[in-house]
């Protein structure tokens, strides 16, 4: 199959598995996933599976990227924080759905590579920085939505502080990497939140920067 056929098949699979947002489906089709995977895996770029990156990290399967984007309920004018840039693929999908994305990566090489890929694709509204994602990106807050692409047993308080009233934060939560649930937290007011569970997922651990 050529790339267009592969993308069409990916979209069909996403729809069959519960992705119903036309905007999310359009973003998933528009972003060239092959640009974000390692050269040895480009033939598998549109398979619905996670693929390896360097530093024992992965690019999430398309279903997870689409699901997180759908659950965030993004509007065109939203400003979004992403924790865990990885390849930059998910940030680029989010950038197709909102005004600006600010994405933080704790592994220097991944941050550099993602920023370069995004630059080569001439994407203007996705901003990458190296740092401790558990601390967010305070200088650019508040955010209408926050996407956390790593799992943990709690939500870092700094991220909740940087979420606007009415904002949505999506994070894999659980006590162990193989027992995580994708959770959406909606900020009702300064000290009140609503939480909803969207099923089991697997992610690498959410860790502070140690370099």
Image (cartoon, helix red, strand yellow):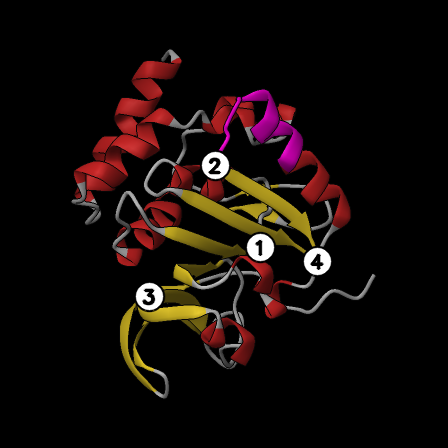
Residue 183 visible in image:
no
Q: Which span is picked out in magenta?
A: 115-125
Mark 3 nearby-residue class (10 Å; few <14, some 14–19, many ≥20): many
Q: In which quarter of the image is residue 23?
A: top left
Counting from the top left corner in percent of width and height, residue 161 is at 48, 76
Residue placed under numbered mark 1 in the picture: 84
Q: Residue drawn 28% across and 57% down?
A: 71
Most extreme residue toward the bottom is: 191
Q: Residue drawn 48% across and 69% down?
A: 162
4 or 1: tag closer to the N-terminus: 1
Query: Of residues 166 and 208, which is closer to you in this image?
Result: 166
Q: Which of marks 1 and 3 is in front?
A: 3
Considering the numbered disc 4 on the image, is that residue within a helix, a strand or a loop? loop
Q: What is the C-alpha distance between the residues marked 4 and 2?
A: 19 Å
Considering the numbered disc 1 on the image, is that residue within a helix, a strand or a loop? loop
Residue placed under numbered mark 2 in the picture: 125
Q: Which of marks 4 and 2 is in front?
A: 2
Q: Residue drawn 41% across and 33% down?
A: 47
Q: In which quarter of the image is residue 204?
A: bottom right
Residue placed under numbered mark 3 in the picture: 168
Q: Quadrant of residue 118?
A: top right
> Disc 2, disc 1: CB below 8 Å?
no
Q: Is residue 80 left or right of residue 40?
A: left
Mark 2 nearby-residue class (10 Å; few <14, some 14–19, many ≥20): some
Q: What is the C-alpha distance between the residues marked 4 and 1?
A: 10 Å
Q: In this view, does 181 lie to the left or right of 124?
A: left
2 or 1: tag closer to the N-terminus: 1
């Amino acid at each position: 199959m050529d790339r267009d056929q592969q993308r069409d098949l990916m979209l069909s699979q996403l729809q069959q598995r519960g992705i119903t947002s036309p905007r999310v489906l359009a973003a998933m089709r528009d972003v060239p996933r092959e640009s974000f995977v390692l050269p040895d895996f480009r033939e598998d770029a549109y398979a619905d599976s996670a693929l390896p990156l360097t530093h024992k990290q992965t690019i999430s399967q398309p279903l997870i990227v689409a699901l997180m984007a759908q659950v965030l309920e993004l509007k065109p004018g939203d400003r979004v924080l992403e924790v865990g840039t990885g390849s930059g693929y998910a940030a680029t999908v989010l950038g197709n759905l909102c005004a600006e994305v600010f994405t933080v990566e704790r592994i220097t090489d991944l941050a550099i590579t993602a920023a370069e890929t995004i630059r080569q694709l001439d994407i203007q509204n996705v901003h990458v920085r190296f740092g401790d994602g558990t601390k967010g990106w305070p200088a650019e807050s508040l955010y209408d939505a926050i996407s956390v692409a790593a799992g943990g047993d709690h939500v870092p308080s700094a991220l909740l502080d940087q979420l606007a009233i009415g904002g949505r934060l999506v994070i894999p939560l659980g006590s162990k990497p193989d027992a995580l649930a994708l959770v959406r937290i909606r900020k009702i007011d300064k000290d009140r939140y609503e939480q909803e569970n969207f099923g089991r997922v697997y992610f690498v651990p959410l860790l502070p920067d140690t370099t």
